[in-house]
Amino acid sequence: MKRISVYIISTVLLAASTGLSAQFRHSTADPDSVDFQLNIRIGADIANPILYFINDNNMNLEGYISVDLNEKYGISFNGGYADYNLSKFSYEYGATGIYFKPGADFNILKPQISEGKYWAGIGVRYGVGIFSFETPSITYNNYWGTTTTSIPPQSATAHFIEIAPGFNAKISNNFTMGWRVNMSTLLYASPKEKIGPIYIPGYGARDKGVNFSFNYFLSLSFPYKTIKAKFKDDDAGANYEELETETE
């Protein structure tokens, strides 16, 4: 009888431990989820206005609006105005115009880290500059002495691709700060004559294969939706699922 009791108790304990083990494996296999806040952001760059007070050759004003589509992807639209002036020993040059840079943003942070408050990733933009340029004064020496001439204003357009890695963080419920490093390469610029634009608004110096620039944005952030972003700890945050819930 004693041996039968021991056998029954051992069987029950084994079954219980097997059930708990199976339940544990099942619970760890199921992905966890986190509330992820989607935002609409409207911001302005403060880095270039500060640089303008240091070097007043180039005034560049830029702003943007972005919308989170989910925990990984978003769309953005950047736009700005530039007024560039260059004075050398033998000539003066000026360019004034606007530019637009629509594109997409990709967040590489896991949703349990980001939670809609932090963003670190890369943006891809297609830039278009619409501007005019002129050379008010050109001085050169020839056989008859020193000659001064000028080139009247001309209209121009330019197209370029921009890659913009960066980071931003929500400081409060409606305030975000962040930076971008912009790397741009020119696709096309008109006119194609020898006397073309030296500087392109939104892009930079025309003669460079890749232009680098920097933005530091102060932004207003408006939450418009909260989703459930699911992730697996053992899969580096892959296979997310989204379940819409109302924003609190």
Image (cartoon, rainbow, N blue to C red):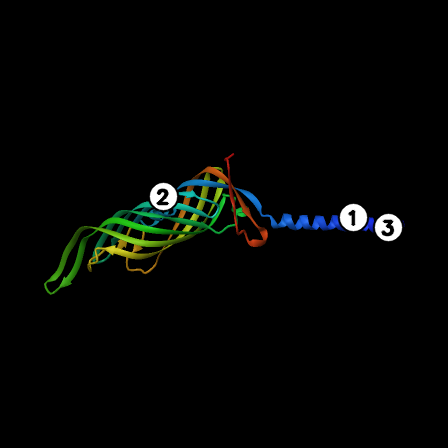
Sequence-first disc among 3 and 2: 3
Q: Position of residue 149 (x, y in %)?
A: 14, 55
Instruction: Give me the C-alpha separation between circle 3 and circle 2.
Output: 80 Å
Determine whether label 1 and label 2 are within 8 Å by CB.
Answer: no
Q: Amino acid at mark 2?
A: Gly
Q: Residue at x 47, y 38 (%)?
A: 225
Q: Which residue is mark 3?
A: 4
Q: Residue at x 47, y 41 (%)?
A: 38
Mark in the foreground, 3 or 2: 3
Front-lying residue, 32 or 115? 32
Front-lying residue, 79 or 126? 126
Mark in the foreground, 1 or 2: 1
Mark in the foreground, 3 or 1: 3
Q: Is residue 142 left or right of residue 127?
A: left
Q: Amino acid at mark 3?
A: Ile
Q: Amino acid at mark 1?
A: Val
Q: Position of residue 135 (x, y in %)?
A: 20, 53
Determine whether label 3 and label 1 are within 8 Å by CB.
Answer: no
Q: Which residue is mark 1?
A: 12
Q: Give the secondary structure at mark 3.
A: helix
- Label 3: how many residues lie within 10 Å, few (<14), some (14-19) or many (20+)? few
Sequence-first disc among 1 and 2: 1
Q: Which residue is mark 2?
A: 63
Q: Is residue 61 visible?
A: no
Front-lying residue, 135 or 75? 75
